Image (spheres, grey):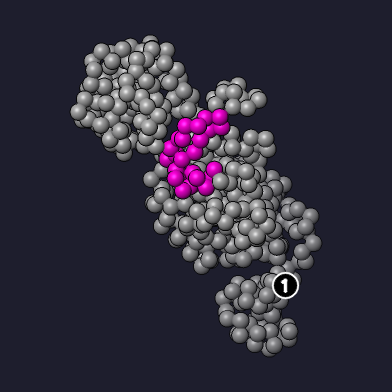
Amino acid sequence: MRVLIVDDEARIRKTTRIAVETAGHTGVEAPNGARALALLGAEAFDACFLDLKLGQEDGLAELEKLLKLQPSLAVVMFTAYATITSTVEAMRRGACDFIPKPFTPDQVRTVLAKIERTSAMQHHLRSLENQLADESPALDLESPELAVQRAQAVLFKAAATPATILLLGPSGIGKSTLAREVHRRSPQRDAAFVTVNCPSLSRDWPESELFGHVQGAFPGAIADTKGLVAAAEGGTLFLDEIGELPTLIQPKLLRLLQEGEYERVGEPLPRRARVRVMAATNRNPADEIMAGRLREDLFCQLNVISVILPGLRERPADLSRLAEGYRKFFASRMGKPVRSFSPAVHMALAGYAWPGNLRELRNVVERAVILCSGEAIELCDLPEGFAAVPDPGIAVGARVTLEALEAEHLHRVLAFSRNLDEAAKTLGIDPATLYRKRQKLGLV
C-alpha cells in the first residue's frame, strides 16, 4: 500500500515511515496539511497517518479535507493528546482507527494489517460484483410501461443524492439489480455495494454480522470482526427484504440512519458510518407495522424516497422484449444458434401468470435455450405448466377475415388478463372501446 504520513515532527514521520516500510509498504512524508493535500491531489494513497495536533493546524479539520479529496482513504489518527472525546470525534468525522503517542512500530504494523485486510475484502467484493455482471444479462431500462418509467425516473434522480431509498414490489422483480444501478449512478459508485440479506442474518448474533464485534464479546468471538456496515464504508449498504430484519436490531439500524453511528458488539466506542442506505421488501410495510414486525419510526427513516415496482404480469408490454433479451444472452453464452421463439411459445409466455416475475422468466428462458435442439424455441422446451397452453389457432397471415382475426386476438388477451382495464391497456384502447368490441364480436 501507499501510506501518507502527516506530522509536524520530523522524528515521528521518520519512525512511522520506517515501520510502514518494514511492513512491506511505501511511506511518503508530509509536514503539514497543505503538503498532504498536494500529495493526495497528485497521486492516490491507500492509508494515512495523521497527527491530531498538527502544529498550528487542526488535525480534525485536515481529516475532513483529506477525505473530501479521497473518500476511500483509510485515515489513522495519532496524538499525544488522546482523550475519549477526541477519539469519538475523529471516528465521527471518518477516521478508521486511532493510535496514542508514544506508539511502537508494532502498533503501526498492526493497524496497517487491519487496513490491508479491509482493503482486500473490498477488492474481493468488487471482483464478485464484476463476476456477477458477466454472468447476468445487461439491465434493460427501456420499458414502454409508464409505471416502470416513473419509478426509474424517481430512482435515478435520487441516485445523485445521499437520500435513503426504499424499493417495494414482489419477489423476483429485480429490486436488487435496480439498486445496483442506482449505486452505479451515485457518487459512491467507486466504493463497495454490500448486500445484507436480512432473512439470512445469524439467528444468534445478527447485530454482530451487521455491525461487527470485538474479540471476546460473546462465546465464539475469537477475533475482531468489522461487519457489513464497515465493509460498505464510503459506498452503499443494501438491506434486502428489510421486512424480515430481526426486531432486536431494528433500533440499532434506526440509530445508523438517524445519526450515522453504530457500535460493534462488545465495544462501547461509537463509530461513524459513511454509507448510503437502500432497502427493499416484498411485503406491505403497513401490514408489517400493524403486526409488530417492523418499527414505524424505522420505516419512516427508510421511506425518504420510495418507489413501487410492478410485477411482470402488470407490465405486459415488457414481456416479449425481456424474453428476447434473455434468449440472446443465453444463446450467446452457450454458443447455440437459438434465434427465436415459435408463435406457440409466444402465446404460452403471454398467457402465463409469472408469479416469480423476472427471476422466473430468466430461468424459463435459460432452460429453454439449453433444451432447444433447433433455431426456434418450441413448446416442448418450456416447463410442464406451459405445455398445456392450446395451439395458436387462427394466426396472422391465415386465410381469415380481419373480423375473425380481431375476435381471436381479443379472446386471447381477455383470457390472460385479470380485468378489462388490464386487457384494454395491453390492446392500447380504452375500456369503453373494448367493452363495445366485446359486445359486437359476441365475446361477453
Quarter placement of the C terminus: bottom right
Residue 313 appearing in the image: yes
Viewed as shown, does residue 188 lie left or right of 365?
A: left
Q: Quadrant of residue 88?
A: top left
Where is 258 relative to 60, above or below?
A: below
Q: How many marks?
A: 1
What is the span of residues highlighted in magenta in the rendered image? 252-276
Q: Quadrant of residue 378?
A: bottom right
Where is 439 relative to 47, above or below?
A: below
| Kind of element beneath mark 1 | helix
Q: Could you tell me which residue is drawn at 61 percent across and 81 percent down?
A: 431
Front-most of 364 and 253?
253
Front-most of 396 and 380?
380
Viewed as shown, does residue 286 lie left or right of 143?
A: right
Q: Could you tell me which residue is drawn at 42 percent across and 55 percent down?
A: 158
Quarter placement of the N terminus: top left
Amino acid at dot 1:
Ala
Residue underneath mark 1: 415
Q: Could you tell me which residue is drawn at 44 percent across and 25 percent down?
A: 115
Where is 433 relative to 155, above or below?
A: below
Q: Residues within 10 Å of mark 1 (few under 14, many from 20)?
A: few
Q: Could you tell me which residue is drawn at 59 percent across and 43 percent down?
A: 249
